[in-house]
């Protein structure tokens, strides 16, 4: 137990250091601008006075480390400053949208994880059969298609032709849960199609890796059915890599939603990021990048910790 | 020597004549393209003529160096002849684009020479790999020959907004006189530009940029990875930590962040994506090289007093090649999708440059009228990445199969 605690605290410490360095990069990258933020936004035509005003307003007249410290403290306490474009509180803007993005990611995960695991186990069970090979080709194709291709095909068939789901997922805070679910079904389907392939392939590989081990041989000699061997004997031992790939795909779901959100005009964090990038609204870009990076690092950390926790050799040391 | 000669001779007679004659025809043809096609004499023409000489020399040398069969020679000669004849029939458009013709010829001949050389391996390749190879070849040719193949110009407006598929050219002054019945096979886009032409030019822009970026990412990541593995110590530690940090930020978000600051231009897109992508290459190159560095033959080379460069070049690189080549294909797909995604978001290649990602975005409204036009560029992206993936899958299967 001691060893596990030590390893876990090590990982968490490493994660925190990474997060700190990443926040430094995100804050520092704006310093790379020729001139500074104010000059960049106001353009060449701005008078000295307006630029100076803008600088004092945004606190640019102080050294970088002071501003960075304040920014970091603000991020942690929820005071994220104001947007340059519309002077609104960033925390307000980001809060609702982060909720929407998490909702979409959770919805997509709820569909994709069971499908991927089932398909993966079946492919391992019937490996090298026609089913396995066709699933292989299909997943290889979905991995390598752009998200917007999948999204527009779904729109064409499920929304325009069949009229089952709305093609635009405009969600307002006052929408009920079911309404939300219906409106975000197509984006969730798109994300599902994109991530299922990867999870399924990893599940299949993890199980097939184990099938050569002696205890599987033993179970087979005992006369167990192949399905039972895989579910009872192989799956528990393949859990660590499977959990790992599931969590990593969750990270992808939250971060990779950017394009899907833009296609479906879904009011999430990704849409906000893209809008702010084209408006060159630096504070919002920084805040949402940090949130994305935080989620990404946190989920990677979670994957790490779960794979330590699900490792039988570490859990039951001799 | 005598044995191989005998075995070749039993196939069909290999005559050096076919090879020589075909090379001479190609040489004369390319020379004519540069001399007759380009009106005035410029440094480019001189460079072109030099390139033709170099090309003819290299092609002949390579071709005659192969282990040849009569059938193989005939196939290469026939394919080259088809290209030359096609160019002679459409002499006007081919001779106007001398460099495109030159590189098109090089790709056609190079491709067919490779097919002939590796025929024994290729014959056993699964259909998916063949499909992938053909797709890659066709895309490469389209990208190179874009101005010759495309019916209209990249940015020329030839009709009104969103013409249907197969509509005839309406604005007469913009259509060539003999092409009164020239159709816009895929209709027009939101500004009245021909979709098919933009699709073909888009192949050149998007694939070219992705290819360049991948090469940069590989040079950077590969060299750093091999160096880290062979030097070890603090160099390895430092680069690995930097890469860890860079990989901790999701790459799309990171590149959006950087592009906000530096602005979107060809140079910044290529550099940003190349640097971010080189981290993945670094990881792989380092991991593969780490396994090789501990081998006895590397130890022997070190004891022999060979330098760092020699060890990387002669001991590490040849043995690390198969996984790196496969990774090149996968990275190319990734970069290609990445650039398309950026363009789709409006932050990649800027208009009026034709680009598949932005073409999808610009015409996306058509999908609500049950028009599949926006799916065509998206499908073009998907087809190429699927094709490359099939080839890589086969290649990986093959190289790993040979090892075990």
Image: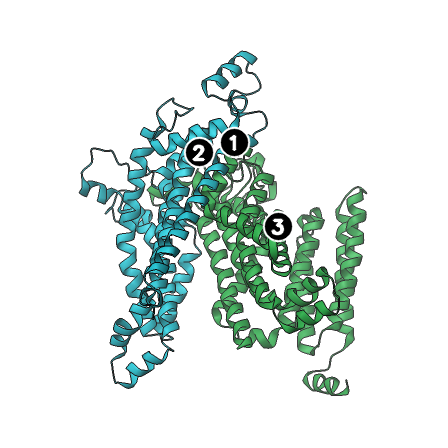
Q: Earlier in the sequence, mark 2 or mark 1?
A: 1
Which mark is nearer the camera, 2 or 3? 2
Q: Quadrant of residue B85?
A: bottom right
Give the drawing colour for chain A.
Answer: cyan
Q: Which residue is mark 2?
A: A286
Which chain's residue wears label 1?
A: A
Q: Are marks 2 and 1 in contact (CB under 8 Å)?
A: yes
Image quadrant occupied by the C terminus of chain A: bottom left
Residue B149 or residue A91, whichever sits in front: A91
Query: Residue B185, can we see it?
Result: no
Q: Would you identify the image quadrant in which residue B75 lies?
A: bottom right
Query: What is the distance, in whole Å, between disc 2 and disc 3 at their CAs?
Result: 28 Å
**Residue B216: mark in rendering:** 3
Q: Are marks 3 and 1 on the same chain?
A: no
Chain letter for mark 2: A
Q: Nearer the viewer, residue A301 or B263?
A: A301
Which type of secondary structure does the marked residue at label 1 adopt? helix
Identify whether B19 is placed above or below B172. Answer: below
Label 3: which secondary element? helix
Tell me what residue is drawn at x 80 percent, y 57 percent.
Answer: B53
């Amino acid at each position: 137990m001691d060893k596990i605690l030590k390893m876990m605290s090590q990982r968490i410490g490493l994660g925190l250091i990474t997060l700190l360095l990443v926040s430094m990069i995100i804050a520092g990258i704006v310093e790379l601008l020729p001139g500074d933020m104010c000059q960049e936004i106001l353009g060449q035509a701005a008078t000295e006075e307006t630029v100076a005003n803008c600088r004092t307003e945004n606190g640019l007249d102080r050294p970088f480390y002071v501003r960075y410290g304040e920014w970091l403290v603000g991020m942690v306490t929820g005071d994220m400053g104001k947007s340059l474009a519309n002077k609104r509180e960033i925390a307000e803007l980001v809060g609702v949208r982060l909720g929407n993005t998490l909702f979409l990611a959770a919805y997509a995960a709820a569909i994709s994880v069971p499908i991927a695991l089932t398909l993966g186990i079946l492919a391992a069970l019937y490996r090298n059969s026609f089913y396995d090979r066709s699933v292989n080709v299909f997943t290889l194709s979905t991995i390598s298609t752009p998200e917007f291709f999948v999204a527009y095909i779904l729109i064409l068939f499920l929304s325009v032709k069949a009229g089952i789901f709305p093609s635009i997922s405009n969600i307002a805070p006052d929408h009920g849960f079911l309404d939300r679910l219906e409106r975000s079904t197509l984006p969730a389907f798109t994300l599902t199609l994109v991530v299922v392939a990867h999870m399924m392939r990893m599940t299949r590989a993890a199980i097939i890796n184990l099938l050569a081990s002696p205890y599987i041989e033993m179970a087979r000699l005992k006369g167990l059915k192949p399905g039972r061997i895989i579910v009872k004997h192989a799956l528990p031992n393949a859990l660590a890599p499977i959990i790992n790939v599931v969590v990593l795909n969750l990270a992808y779901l939250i971060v990779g939603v950017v394009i899907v959100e833009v296609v479906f005009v879904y009011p999430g964090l990704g849409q906000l990021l893209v809008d702010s990038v084209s408006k060159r609204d630096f504070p919002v870009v920084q805040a949402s990048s940090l949130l994305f990076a935080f989620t990404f690092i946190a989920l990677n950390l979670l994957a790490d910790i779960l794979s330590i926790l699900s490792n039988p050799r570490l859990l039951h040391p001799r | 020597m005598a044995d191989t000669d005998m075995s070749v001779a039993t196939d069909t007679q290999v005559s050096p004549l076919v090879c020589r004659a075909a090379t001479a025809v190609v040489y004369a043809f390319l020379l004519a393209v540069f001399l007759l096609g380009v009106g005035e004499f410029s440094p480019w023409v001189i460079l072109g003529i030099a390139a033709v000489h170099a090309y003819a020399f290299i092609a002949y040398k390579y071709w005659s160096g192969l282990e040849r069969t009569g059938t193989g020679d005939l196939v290469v000669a026939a394919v080259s002849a088809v290209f030359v004849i096609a160019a002679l029939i459409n002499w006007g458009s081919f001779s106007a684009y001398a460099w495109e013709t030159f590189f098109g010829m090089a790709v056609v001949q190079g491709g067919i020479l490779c097919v002939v050389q590796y025929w024994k391996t290729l014959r056993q390749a699964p259909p998916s790999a063949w499909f992938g190879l053909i797709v890659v070849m066709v895309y490469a040719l389209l990208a190179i020959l874009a101005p010759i193949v495309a019916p209209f110009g990249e940015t020329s407006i030839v009709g009104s907004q969103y013409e249907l598929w197969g509509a005839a050219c309406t604005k007469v002054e913009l259509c060539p006189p003999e092409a009164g019945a020239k159709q816009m096979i895929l209709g027009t886009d939101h500004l009245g530009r021909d979709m098919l032409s933009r699709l073909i030019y888009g192949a050149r822009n998007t694939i070219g940029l992705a290819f360049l970026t991948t090469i940069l990412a590989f040079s950077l990541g590969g060299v750093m990875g091999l160096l880290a593995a062979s030097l070890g110590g603090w160099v390895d530690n430092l680069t690995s930590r930097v890469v860890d940090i860079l990989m901790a930020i999701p790459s799309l978000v990171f590149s959006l962040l950087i592009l906000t600051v530096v602005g979107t231009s060809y140079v910044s897109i290529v550099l940003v994506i190349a640097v971010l992508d080189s981290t993945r290459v670094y990881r792989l190159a380092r991991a593969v090289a780490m396994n090789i560095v501990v081998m006895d033959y590397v130890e022997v080379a070190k004891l022999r007093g060979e330098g760092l460069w020699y060890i990387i070049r002669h001991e590490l690189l040849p043995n690390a090649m198969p996984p790196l080549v496969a990774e090149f294909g996968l990275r190319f797909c990734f970069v290609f999708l990445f650039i398309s995604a950026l363009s789709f978001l409006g932050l990649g290649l800027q208009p009026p440059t034709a680009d598949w990602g932005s073409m999808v975005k610009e015409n996306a409204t058509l999908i609500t009228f049950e028009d599949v036009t926006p799916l065509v560029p998206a499908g073009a992206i998907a087809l190429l990445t699927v094709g490359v993936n099939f080839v890589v899958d086969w290649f990986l299967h093959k190289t790993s199969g040979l090892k075990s």
